[in-house]
Image (tube, grey):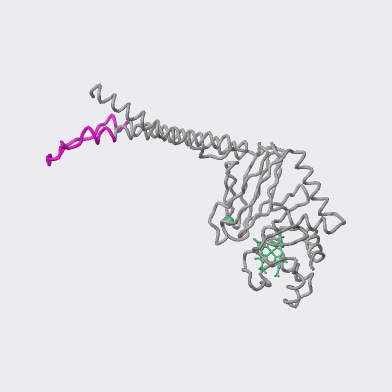
Amino acid sequence: MRRGSVAALVVIGLIAGGIAAAVALLIPWLPPDASRQAGRTDFEFWFVVTICIVIFAIVSAVMIYSVWRFRAAPDDTSDGPPIHGHTGLEIAWTVIPTILVTAIGITSAIVLSRNGAVASNVMRINVTAQQFAWTFNYPEANNLSSSTLMLPKNREVELYMQSKDVIHSFFVPQFRLTQDIVPGITTKLVITPDKDGTYPVICHELCGLGHATMRTTAVVMEPAAFDKWLKSQSKAIGSPNPSVAGLTVFTDNGCAACHTLTAAKAKGTVGPDLDKLKQYAAQAHQPLQSFITTSIVNPNAYIQPGYPRNVMPQTFGKSLTKQQLDALVTYLVNSAK
Ligand SMILES: [Cu+2]
């Protein structure tokens, strides 16, 4: 090959690689990372991207150079010369990708096994996914239930995830972790959050009409603050003051997102106004307390006219402990006007 051709190939390759690298590096593709697993996932991500950029540069150089250098003259209708391949090139484009793909396979396997490794002091959290809500239960704290995923910083947690209906998927971009939740099996995910903050928990698998609303937040806090939260929750739920206990259950389980309730400063409008429960119970010809209990445990048993069925999560009967449910019902009975 002529010197000039080599120089042209190198220049085109550097320009193409430079553009691809700029697109990769100058645009902030990834949100900040907030878990120990995220660092490893990002390493693998950039390892693959780097390989892609180099290959892109080589392919672009050869392609652009060939289109320009070997183009046919406008009046040239003759066939090109017969060529029988190039053994050296064929060996190169087989061996090099084999090495690269093997390297990606090995590094991915290492990242996966490190990310899945469980420490001895791991904290278990049970996750229930269902159209279209998340519930988190803490077996270490009497199965305390929360609709927000509260996590202590630097402590490894293992999620045991189950679905009540269809396939969902747990995804927190800042943790760089995602795992499907499949009816009938328990899938697991290990997370070691390492930065305080509030991050979105997203359902990552199209799971029905309300899929886009199947979101909550993960809150990572200092271990001391987390212990305080656990204690205050357990205490509030066991509180002899029913309004404290019930309010805690109400706010922790996302009721405020869909319902209005003055006592809880809730302004949701997806579901009926819970300040009017007395009136609704009368319309349904049911005693107030059993009307409220059934509405929470089995929302489809009675559908308030004008409101959609299957929107209120069907999980509360399972996810709330008896104590939490009692506190919640008492609270709603007392705050109904
Ligand atoms: Cu979902």
**Could you tell me which residue is drawn at 73 percent across and 69 percent down?**
294
Is 75 a magenta residue? yes
Looking at the image, the residue that sits furthest to the top is 3
Would you say 123 lies left or right of 171 here? right
The one nearer the camera, 311 or 55, is 311
Rendered position, 172 above or below 18: below
Compared to residue 87, the image places residue 306 above or below, namely below
**Residue at coordinates 29% horizontally, 24% vertically from top-left?**
7
Picture quadrant where residue 319 is located: bottom right
Q: Quadrant of the C terminus?
A: bottom right
Read off the magenta span. Answer: 63-91
Along the viewing direction, whichever of 284 and 97 lies nearer the viewer: 284
Indicate the position of residue 241 as horizontal and vertical percent values. Answer: 86, 57
66, above or below 130, in the image: above
| Quarter assignment of residue 295 | bottom right
| Quarter that holds the N terminus | top left
User: 148 or 322: nearer the eye?
Assistant: 148
Q: Is residue 93 magenta?
A: no
Q: Could you tell me how many numbered marks the image carries?
A: 0
Q: Is residue 166 above or below residue 149?
A: below
Q: Residue 43: percent from the left, percent from the top?
A: 53, 33
The spot of residue 167 in percent (x, y) is: 56, 56
Where residue 148 appears, x then y in whole percent? 69, 50
Question: In the displayed structure, does residue 101 sit left or right of residue 30?
Answer: left
